[in-house]
Image (tube, grey):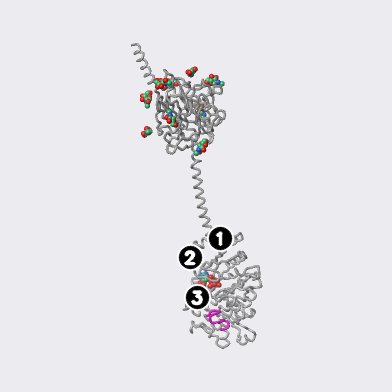
């Protein structure tokens, strides 16, 4: 009976003990809890347990207020237990934390004599490592202390009675899938979860850590086989201990669950209080993700806009030198000319000549119709002088000149901008099959106009301007069929040169005065010679040189005159619709101007007077002219040219021994 009673009492006692020892709690945030705090520890308004703030060299503790029975009172063995918590360490400086913190099982509630800094608020210098401490801890250390044999600054350890960990490792977790270890940084500021279990039968402690978005790994990070029975007292306190040193961090515990003799209840992460959005965390996120992304996109934007700009700049690149600023209004932007001519498309092509192609266009700003001549040139040599001339020529204003509006310079290319002449060039009215009708009075008016334009160039402007390329294709007809000289001075571009050996004579075969071909010197007389060829051309409707028929127009007209019937040389297309006196005047004047001796040619002033009828043409007989040594044919000279250059070639380039003189030969 007594034994029965004793047995019953024992069963009841053990039952009572079993009930009382099976402590369990789950804190998702600590708002309604009654933790015992000291030091820096405090609860934030949203229920976070903040162990430390950025105050240096301090400790802090947060203990579950009631003692926990850890040992079987009958045989004194330690119970199994399990705990888990979620923490975050937000360091003051992104790479430097405070000292870290520990989950601790201690015989007292609070560790008042423990030290801050590397002691983590767990021990002091004299008791560190002593058996009498009865302390078990899991340290989450962020600073390397060689005296405690730390593996590195960032580490997790199982401590028994001292800071020299029984087991320690760099924090990380093993993947459930492939068992790969992923490292973690305690001071990353990201919440992480720690699990600690003690198996009372196996006498084994497991410690596991993982980010909150990762399920508990099945393989623990640390395992220590140790019987906790001699270490733990029967009644213990559980909680957290932390410290700051010369550096500090805000260390938070977000949730905590514990269970004696069983598995601690899993924490519902979504129910944990939110971490404060503090500077360092934001900055680190911004620095690690935002900044690189921002930089990358900025770089991409920069690169693409630069390459676009480069492509655009290349497309519309112009050459602009300092001296050209003086020519301000005469310079066109390539972009404008590009727009005006619709990108220099073939539909806008007016024609092409010896210097380049001519395009029709409309200036975007003023809606003025223009003709743009693209002249290619190899060298920049003499470009400055040439542009100076072009610009001063641009100041020429005469009703019988094609107005030059300006220019634009690119690499290897010069663009000249002229007024658009709606009726095109004269040559197509003379030889095109069938010829476009241009009656004698119209032709005579054009002749008088061109004479007046050339006279203006030679004598009426402030400087002498030599045209150098007078011919039917350079006479353009405006809306009222007025003859206008174009392309003046352009031959000059090819005439420039410092080396006499390389200087070219430029003109058109058949219009080139013999002395010009010989010496390379262009003068007003050489222009008069070309004008003579032009007169004969317009009157006769024939080209100055017809290689197929081996006819040189001057010789042919002269032979008609010698034969006593100069009017036979007239253009047959005119029929009888012409005024004989005018025709005779034009033909005779043409021959006079084509005199091989420059001195014998009339000046443009005289030519204008003859054409206007103000002064009668001197009565010279062709016989007299021949007697005085006149030779219209310069067959030798021309043949030389014709042989050395293919007849199809429009331009005659000949080497000359003298430097071509300036287009503008001084002021008047
Ligand atoms: N200002 C203009 N207005 C209208 N058409 C023009 C104008 N300038 C030139 N053209 C046209 O462009 C064509 C080509 O002119 P371009 O001056 O290039 O050749 P060219 O006069 O035959 O030879 P050169 O190179 O000796 O001047 C001309 O025949 C003419 O029809
Ligand atoms: C936790 O302890 C309480 C008593 O404090 C008990 O009612 C509850 O069933 C226990 N829960 C678990 C999961 O052991
Ligand atoms: C909280 O714990 C303290 C002792 O640590 C105790 O005095 C107090 O009554 C407790 N309060 C509550 C609400 O549990
Ligand atoms: C840190 O916490 C302690 C204790 O709560 C407080 O006295 C101190 O002012 C806090 N310091 C800072 C910088 O927040
Ligand atoms: C101690 O007692 C418990 C039951 O109360 C038993 O499970 C355990 O095995 C005992 N330990 C030892 C070492 O006898
Ligand atoms: C813990 O137990 C040891 C003996 O096992 C004892 O000396 C010590 O005083 C106890 N500590 C506390 C705080 O009860
Ligand atoms: C260290 O701590 C122990 C008890 O935890 C205490 O007795 C001792 O006085 C402390 N030593 C110092 C130097 O604070
Ligand atoms: C993880 O940390 C350990 C210890 O610092 C190191 O040896 C290992 O290379 C790290 N692994 C990775 C993947 O960074
Ligand atoms: C500790 O981990 C090992 C696997 O490494 C496992 O076999 C053992 O059951 C674990 N112990 C506890 C108490 O979870
Ligand atoms: C976690 O808590 C949320 C909200 O309190 C709830 O909706 C969800 O079902 C919980 N999850 C688990 C696994 O208990
Ligand atoms: Mg031309």
Region of the chain picked out in magenta, as a range: 542-556
Q: Which residue is mark 2?
A: 345
Query: Where does label 1 land, which residue?
Result: 318
Q: Is there any visible trace of residue 284 in the rendered image?
A: no
| Quadrant in which residue 620 is drawn | bottom right
Question: Ligand 3 sits in which quadrant?
Answer: top left
What SS does tag 2 mark?
A: loop
State yes or no: residue 222 in magenta. no
379 vs 547: above or below: above
Label 3 sits on residue: 428
First in sequence: mark 2 or mark 1? 1
Q: The C terminus appears in which quarter of the rendering? A: bottom right
In the image, 413: left or right of 219? right
Q: Secondary structure at mark 3?
A: helix
Pointers 2 and 1 in contact (C-beta within 8 Å): no
Q: Nearer the viewer, residue 413 or 392?
A: 413
Residue 32 coordinates in the image, percent (x, y): 41, 26
The furthest residue to the top: 2
Circle 1: element type: loop
Question: Is the CB atom of the residue marked by disc 3 within 8 angstroms of ligand 1's nearest atom?
Answer: yes
């Amino acid at each position: 009976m007594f034994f029965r009673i004793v047995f019953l009492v024992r069963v009841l006692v053990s039952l009572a003990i079993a009930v009382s020892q099976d402590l369990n709690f789950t804190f998702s945030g600590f708002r309604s809890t009654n933790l015992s705090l000291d030091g820096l520890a405090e609860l934030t308004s949203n229920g976070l347990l903040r162990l430390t703030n950025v105050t240096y060299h301090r400790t802090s503790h947060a203990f579950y207020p009631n003692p926990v029975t850890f040992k079987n009172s009958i045989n004194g063995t330690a119970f199994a237990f399990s705990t888990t918590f979620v923490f975050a360490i937000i360091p003051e400086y992104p790479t430097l934390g405070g000292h870290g913190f520990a989950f601790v099982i201690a015989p007292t509630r609070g560790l008042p004599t423990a030290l801050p800094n590397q002691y983590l608020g767990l021990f002091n210098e004299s008791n560190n490592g002593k058996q009498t401490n009865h302390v078990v801890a899991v340290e989450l250390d962020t600073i390397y202390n060689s005296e405690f044999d730390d593996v590195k600054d960032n580490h997790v350890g199982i401590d028994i009675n001292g800071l020299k960990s029984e087991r320690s490792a760099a924090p990380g977790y093993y993947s459930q899938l492939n068992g790969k270890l992923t490292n973690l940084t305690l001071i990353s500021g990201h919440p992480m979860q720690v699990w600690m279990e003690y198996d009372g039968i196996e006498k084994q402690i497991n410690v596991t850590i993982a980010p909150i978005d990762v399920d508990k790994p099945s393989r623990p990070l640390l395992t220590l086989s140790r019987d906790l029975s001699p270490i733990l007292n029967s009644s213990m306190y559980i909680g957290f201990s932390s410290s700051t040193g010369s550096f500090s961090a805000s260390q938070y515990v977000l949730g905590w669950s514990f269970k004696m003799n069983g598995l601690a209840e899993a924490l519902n992460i979504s129910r944990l209080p939110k971490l404060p959005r503090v500077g360092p965390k934001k900055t680190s996120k911004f620095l690690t993700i935002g900044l690189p992304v921002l930089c990358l996109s900025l770089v991409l934007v920069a690169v693409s806009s630069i390459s676009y700009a480069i492509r655009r700049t290349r497309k519309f690149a112009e050459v602009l030198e300092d001296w050209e600023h003086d020519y301000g209004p005469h310079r066109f932007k390539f972009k404008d000319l590009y727009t005006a001519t619709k990108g220099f498309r073939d539909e806008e092509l007016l024609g092409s000549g010896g210097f380049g192609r001519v395009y029709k266009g409309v200036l975007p700003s003023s809606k003025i119709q223009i003709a743009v001549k693209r002249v290619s040139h190899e060298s920049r040599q003499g470009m400055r002088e040439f542009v100076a001339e072009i610009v001063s020529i641009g100041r020429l204003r005469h009703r019988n000149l094609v107005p030059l509006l300006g220019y634009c310079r690119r690499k290897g290319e010069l663009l000249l901008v002229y007024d658009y002449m709606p009726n095109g060039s004269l040559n197509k009215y003379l030889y095109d099959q069938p010829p476009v009708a241009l009656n004698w009075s119209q032709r005579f008016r054009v002749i008088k106009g061109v004479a007046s334009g050339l006279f203006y160039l030679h004598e009426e402007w402030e400087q002498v301007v030599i045209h150098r390329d007078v011919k039917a294709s350079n006479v353009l007809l405006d809306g009222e069929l007025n003859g206008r000289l174009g392309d003046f001075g352009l031959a000059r571009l090819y005439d420039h040169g410092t080396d006499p050996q390389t200087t070219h004579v430029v003109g058109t075969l058949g219009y080139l005065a013999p002395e010009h071909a010989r010496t390379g010197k262009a003068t007003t007389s050489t222009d008069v010679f070309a004008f003579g060829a032009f007169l004969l051309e317009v009157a006769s409707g024939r080209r100055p040189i017809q290689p197929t028929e081996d006819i040189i127009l001057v010789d042919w007209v002269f032979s008609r005159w010698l034969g006593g019937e100069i009017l036979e040389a007239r253009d047959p297309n005119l029929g009888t619709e012409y005024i004989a006196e005018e025709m005779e005047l034009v033909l005779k004047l043409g021959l006079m101007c084509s005199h091989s001796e420059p001195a014998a040619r009339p000046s443009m002033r005289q030519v204008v007077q003859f054409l206007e009828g103000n002064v009668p043409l001197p009565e010279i007989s062709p016989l007299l002219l021949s007697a005085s040594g006149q030779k219209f044919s310069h067959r030798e000279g021309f043949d030389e040219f014709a042989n050395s250059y293919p007849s199809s070639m429009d331009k005659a380039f000949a080497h000359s021994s003298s430097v071509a003189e300036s287009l503008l030969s001084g002021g008047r």
